[in-house]
């Protein structure tokens, strides 16, 4: 009787483990990045120049969408002359927003898209040089194309951010 029960118990474990996912049957995820060696969304330095009119220093940057989805960015201006809303933050552990940090063209939420950046595309933009002075960084918020359909309100959608630090500028 004991041998029969032991045999049935061992046999039941065999069938139980057989019903589990086999190592070769695991669903493979498709890549979410076009170039796996780079982040999904990133900003590169292009050049330092001067603004037309006032002659103040500007920093030209390139935002790259390396994901397989379109992203939406808060933008201002007109076609061909868009700028991106951004926030200027300290790039250290201090808290608060001191008066000596310039205010960026920030916007409260990326849920109201103004500019679609398609997968694999880049967007060139400029920020005032003072926004990337020593120990500062800029933050740009964005949202993926598929996120709004998952939520009832644009204010519920996740907020993603990409940063560019003043340490990414060439040394003077």
Image (tube, helix red, strand yellow):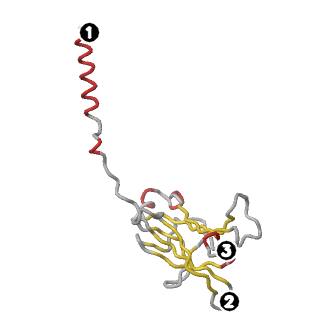
Residue closest to the eye, 41 or 167: 167
Residue 65 percent coordinates (x, y):
45, 69
Q: Secondary structure at mark 3?
A: helix
- The first of marks 1 and 3 along the sequence is 1
Q: Secondary structure at mark 1?
A: helix
Dot 3, crowdedness within 10 Å: few (<14), some or many (≥20)?
many
Q: Farthest residue in the bottom direction?
A: 53
Quadrant including the N terminus:
top left
Q: Residue at x 30, y 46 (%)?
A: 26
For label 3, the residue is 131
Quarter of the image for residue 22 reads top left
Q: In this image, 65 relative to 30: left or right?
A: right
Q: Residue at x 69, y 61 (%)?
A: 92
Q: In this image, 89 relative to 145: left or right?
A: right
Residue 79 percent coordinates (x, y):
49, 84
The CA span between labels 2 and 1 is 93 Å
Work out whether 83 lies above or below 109: below
The CA span between labels 2 and 3 is 15 Å
For label 1, the residue is 2
In contact (CB < 8 Å): disc 1 and disc 3: no
For label 2, the residue is 55
Q: Residue at x 64, y 71 (%)?
A: 166
């Amino acid at each position: 009787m004991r041998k029969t029960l032991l045999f049935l118990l061992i046999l039941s474990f065999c069938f139980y483990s057989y019903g589990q996912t086999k190592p070769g049957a695991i669903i493979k995820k498709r890549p979410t990045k076009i170039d796996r060696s780079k982040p999904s969304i990133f900003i590169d330095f292009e050049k330092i120049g001067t603004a037309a009119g006032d002659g103040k220093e500007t920093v030209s940057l390139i935002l790259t969408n390396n994901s397989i989805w379109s992203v939406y960015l808060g933008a201002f201006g007109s076609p061909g002359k868009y700028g991106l809303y951004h926030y200027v933050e300290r790039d250290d552990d201090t808290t608060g927003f001191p008066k000596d940090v310039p205010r960026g063209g920030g916007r409260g939420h990326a849920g109201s898209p103004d500019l679609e950046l398609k997968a694999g595309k880049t967007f060139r933009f400029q920020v005032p040089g003072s926004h990337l002075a020593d120990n500062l960084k800029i933050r740009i918020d964005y949202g993926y194309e598929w996120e709004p359909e998952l939520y009832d309100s644009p204010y519920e959608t996740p907020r993603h951010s990409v940063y560019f630090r003043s340490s990414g500028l060439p040394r003077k």
